[in-house]
Image (cartoon, rainbow, N blue to C red):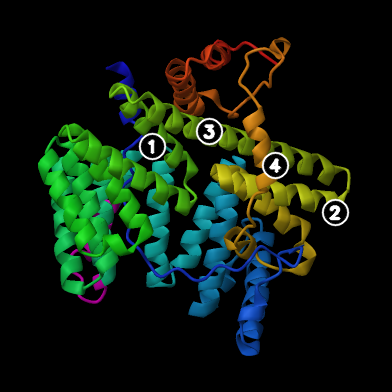
Amino acid sequence: MALARFLGRFLFPARLRVRQNIPRRQDLQTGGKWGRSNSGSMTGGREDERKKNEEKQFELADRFLSSHGGRVDWTKDLNDGDRRLLFEELKSHQSLHVAQGNEPEAALLMDGLELVASGNEHLLYKFRRLEISENERRGLGGRALTAMGVLYETFRNSRRFRARSAEVVMEFGILQDRYGDKEEAYKFFKHSIGRYERSGHRYNLSAAWFNAASVLYDLGRIRASLNACEKGLSLGGASHLDLKTHILLQRANCRERTGEIDLAIEDYIAASTGYSKLGRRRQECNILFRVGWLYGRQRQNLEARNHLHRALKISRELDYSAGLARFHLKRAQYLAGNKFPKRVQQHLQHAIMYAKLARLDKIEKVARGGIFRSQIGRRRPLTFFMKARAPEANAEALAKASQGSYSHRLGDGAATRVWRDSPRSAGKDITFLARLLAELGRQADRPDLVRQSKAVTAWQRSVRQGKRIL
């Protein structure tokens, strides 16, 4: 029973945000060079305009940041286009400082963002949303909820900003679900459903139904949650891979609760396939573990072993990717101090590839910031490097992960792993891995995997007690 409660915590998808128009991302690497745009798909006029905007964006940010908190009165005279360029670039710098742990600098940039946004109603709204996100990041959920309530009162009856009004209703529901009252959250999601039905926005309508299904599940209204999942799929969710995957996972949770285990397993497997296509391998791994555990409960040992083995393979690859990302970033930082520019580029490139695979956002952003600094002479804005598409990770390098094992001591003759810089934030991942190894060891009659499970648990215990194990 304890294991069932543990597993369940990993399988609930996050509430879905409102979908907005997202510009096509350029390649971060094309033809072996970092930072080169995918210009072959653009007309000459569009390419010239893009270069002009990038140069303008770099110049505006350079002038603003060079003031070091001094006079920036000139921002009052910016036209809307230049103001938007400066806002986006300062936002990228603020995001980088957060990833680097430079909280004072990030706070100063928030002040700068508010100053730049004050002359534009659209940018001021974006700043308020960013401010709410920052409150959430810093653990100030109550303050975030209050700030979103102010936006809700401002736009709830707005005829001029109908799309924004619907967005605020949905987002307020998400924050109510997270920090407030789930019954209130459900009311906001139902309100969102009505708005998106009237506007005809099929994606956001399905997302609102999914959010409603999720909060209904939390409230213990399982049949209502199941019906909401069916609505979300039928009203457009089935035609969007991300929506379909989230809804299938929620429906699998519902079916498991109602005792429809075979149908739940079917939905879990379909959801794991969807997450695999989306590149969400951590979620895929968690679901495969759940499926293997369910098969084990039904005494279908072969199916249980197969799914648990697949989950362990993915877990090893993710651990290996995280380790490679950290190694390449640290190596790049060392070489940067000793002036080896070409090798710095190579290591930063690999850090971004593996961090993206392991979904280590902070490491990825720091590495992207390193690429920006290393190419500062090209006068391209940080925003380009933060948004550009990264190349795929090296599959051959990841294949080495399957050859490793988890060990507490170097003397055991196996590979020693450190998964996260902060053991407190890694607790759930490490506990998950330990239970996965133990479950597979029992199902497959593999004492070596049981020993590895104990090693992982011992590593976690040692770190919590402040002991060095390397």
Residue at the spot of label 4: 397
Tag 2 secondary structure: helix
Q: Earlier in the sequence, mark 4 or mark 3?
A: 3
193 to the left or right of 146: left
Q: Which mark is residue 342?
A: 2
Magenta span covers which residues? Answer: 148-162
**Residue 359 magenta:** no
Q: Which mark is residue 315?
A: 3
Label 3 packing within 10 angstroms: few (<14), some (14-19), many (20+) = many
- In this view, the residue farthest toward the bottom is 45
Looking at the rendered structure, the kind of residue marked 1 is Ile
Looking at the rendered structure, the kind of residue marked 2 is Lys
Tag 3 secondary structure: helix
In percent of width and height, residue 458 lies at: 55, 11
Q: Earlier in the sequence, mark 2 or mark 4?
A: 2
Residue at the spot of label 1: 287
Q: Earlier in the sequence, mark 4 or mark 1?
A: 1
- In this view, the residue farthest toward the right is 339
Label 1 packing within 10 angstroms: few (<14), some (14-19), many (20+) = many
Residue 145 visible within the image: no
Residue at 23% x, 63% y is 205
Q: Find residue 288 and report its image quarter.
A: top left
> Which secondary structure is most common in the magenta stretch?
helix
Residue at 49% x, 71% y is 23
Q: Marks 4 and 1, how far apart in space?
A: 25 Å
Looking at the rendered structure, the kind of residue marked 4 is Ala
Looking at the rendered structure, the kind of residue marked 3 is Ser
404 is higher (above) or lower (below) than 63: above
